Image (cartoon, grey):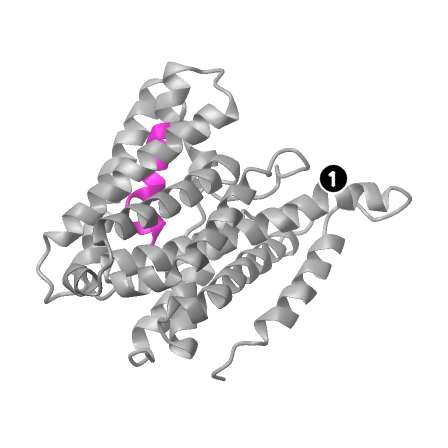
Amino acid sequence: MTRPAFVFPVLVTLILVSLVTGVASLGEDGWWLVFVSRLPRTLAALLAGAGLAVAGVIMQMLARNPFVEPATAGTGQAAGLGLVAVTLLAPGAAIWLKMSAATTAALIGTAGFVALVRRLPTGDPLLVPLTGIVYGGILGAATTFLAYERDLLQYIDIWMSGEFSGVMLGRYEILWIGGALTVLAYLYADRFTIAGFGEETTRSLGLGYGQVVALGLVIVSVITAVTVVTVGMIPFVGLVVPNLVARMRGENLRETLPYVAVSGGVLVLACDIIGRVIRYPFEVPVGTVLGVLGAALFLWILHRGPRRG
């Protein structure tokens, strides 16, 4: 199928299923339960999935490699390091201060990854994701060490394992920042597409390569930070969704970005529903479900032929 329009009916169906899925039944207080818990959880899953998928495709454009995403390039680990640092320095910090610290750390961490990638030889594309894994492992080890020394390992598990069980009205709204940045990414989609051809091509077309890269780094870092602060890090979304959409629609972001965003939301919402019903009435974190499903999808992508476009 070359036009993934089936994604939108699937999205509507999943939203309805998500609103009626849960331990508590929709009795007399059904509308209150939907408004306070089920609807915020559904919106949080859609916003987190759309944001991470868009962040993934932008990072792939900036790194010029289809095998990187925020979770494998050190961005998520850097955001976690920022959260640990602000928790140690200001234990009672407000959510906006935690988000600012996570965003700043993610921005520095992502810029460091891009700088490393630009010094790698271009002959072997697998060097980029391998470098990201090692780089993220170093940042993750530093985060774990600091958390272990100050007895904060439980917080690390919450931030690094994505799950939506704690999402309620008033506890997910900062994810709309990621939604707004997704719209901003669409407005600059043509520039990111050109930046994906390299610095020399971008400058020859009269665009400021540095400004495009800086804007991309800010979008990726803020989306990752607000997701980690709110629901934790969710793996594979930014890796498999852009690759699947690119196989069907090509790599022109102006055309594919809406499909990337909707498909990311669909994937995360579907995995959240699976996590709610697979061991009912208990829940499996969405990060665990995506760890299994995302790995299977990634292996499928690796064994398929080269993508279109």
User: Tag 1: Cα neighbours inside 10 Å, few (<14), some, or many (≥20)?
Assistant: some
Task: Find residue 159 and report its horizontal and vertical position in percent.
Answer: 45, 36
55 vs 36, nearest the viewer:
55
Taking the spot 27% from the left edge, 48% from the top edge, the residue there is 211
Q: Which residues are magenta?
A: 69-82
- Toward the front, the furthest residue is 206
What residue is at 44 percent from the left and 58 percent from the top? 187
Q: Quadrant of the C terminus?
A: bottom left
Q: Is residue 51 left or right of residue 176?
A: left
Instruction: Identify which amino acid the numbered label 1 is placed on.
Output: Val
Image location of residue 285, percent across then percent down: 54, 47
Q: Is residue 31 above or below residue 198?
A: above
In the image, residue 55 sits, relative to residue 231, either above or below, namely: below
Inspect the magenta stretch and tell me whether residue 83 lies in it: no
Question: What residue is at 26 percent from the left and 30 percent from the top?
Answer: 142
Main secondary structure found in the magenta portion: helix
Answer yes or no: is residue 122 visible.
yes
Q: Nearer the viewer, residue 108 or 80?
A: 108
> Residue 281 placed where, x, y %?
69, 47
User: Outermost residue toward the right?
Assistant: 28
Expressed as whole percent of the image width and height from the top left, the position of residue 186 reads 45, 59
Q: Residue at x 28, y 62 (%)?
A: 67
Please identify the quarter of the rendering in which residue 188 is found: bottom left
Above or below: residue 127 compared with residue 32: below
Circle 1 residue: 36
